[in-house]
Image (spheres, grey):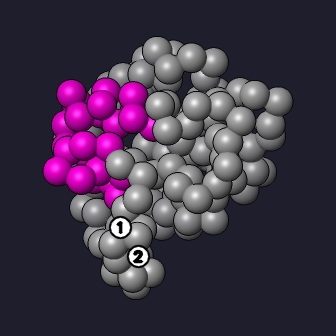
């Protein structure tokens, strides 16, 4: 199974976002192939955007997204790019799981109000991993 992982790269955070992203990516790598700008030869990194032009990033990320079986998005920090990717996934019938770290923030109504997006609020990373496992089981069940 191929997963596209989306998460705010430029946004600030009030929790240990990089560690959560890395943990989610590591978990997904055990379950299949992960396509994400956060990776460099399978290793997590954050400076992806410094090596490529905006157009190159857009085109590569959309290519990855459109060849994925599912989009897993960490949406705790607002991100125009992640919102765009979620919209593209929805319009292309790619299953979407949004993970939202519950820390006195509100998730955008445009994401929360979309009935084609599954949203799971988590308080610790193990809970997020369990939501991913449930999501994948549901995708596999729907394929049968």
Which residue is at the front of the view, 17 or 27?
A: 17
- Above or below — where is 84 with respect to 115? below
Question: Mark 2 near mark 1, Cβ–Cβ under 8 Å?
Answer: yes
Tell me the quarter of the image containing the C terminus: top left
State how many labels appear: 2
* Residue position for label 1: 61
The segment highlighted magenta reads: 21-44
Which residue is at the front of the view, 143 or 1?
A: 1
* Residue position for label 2: 58
| Residue 99 colored in magenta in the image | no
| Residue 43 colored in magenta in the image | yes
Mark 2 Cα-neighbour bin, 10 Å: few <14, some 14–19, many ≥20: some
Q: Residue 68 appears in which quarter of the rendering?
A: bottom left
Q: Is residue 27 left or right of residue 98?
A: left
Q: Secondary structure at mark 1?
A: helix
- Above or below — where is 5 with respect to 102? below
Q: Residue at x 74, y 43 (%)?
A: 107
Q: Secondary structure at mark 2?
A: helix
**Horizontal and vertical percent for residue 90?**
49, 59
Q: Is residue 22 visible?
A: yes
**Horizontal and vertical percent for residue 80?**
63, 65
Q: Residue at x 56, y 37 (%)?
A: 17
Q: Residue 132, which numbered label?
A: none
Q: CA distance from mark 2 to mark 1?
A: 5 Å
Q: Residue at x 35, y 49 (%)?
A: 45
């Amino acid at each position: 199974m191929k997963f596209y992982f989306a998460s705010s790269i430029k946004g600030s955070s009030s929790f240990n976002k990089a560690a959560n992203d890395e943990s989610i990516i590591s978990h997904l790598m055990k379950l299949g192939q992960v396509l994400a700008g956060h990776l460099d030869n399978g290793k997590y990194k954050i400076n992806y955007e410094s090596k490529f032009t905006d157009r190159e990033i857009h085109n590569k990320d959309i290519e990855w997204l459109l060849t994925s079986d599912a989009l897993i998005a960490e949406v705790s920090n607002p991100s125009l790019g992640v919102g765009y990717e979620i919209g593209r996934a929805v319009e292309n019938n790619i299953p979407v799981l949004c993970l939202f770290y519950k820390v006195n923030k509100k998730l955008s109504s445009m994401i929360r109000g979309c009935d084609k997006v599954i949203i799971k609020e988590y308080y610790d990373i193990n809970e997020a991993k369990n939501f991913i496992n449930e999501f994948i089981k549901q995708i596999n069940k729907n394929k049968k």
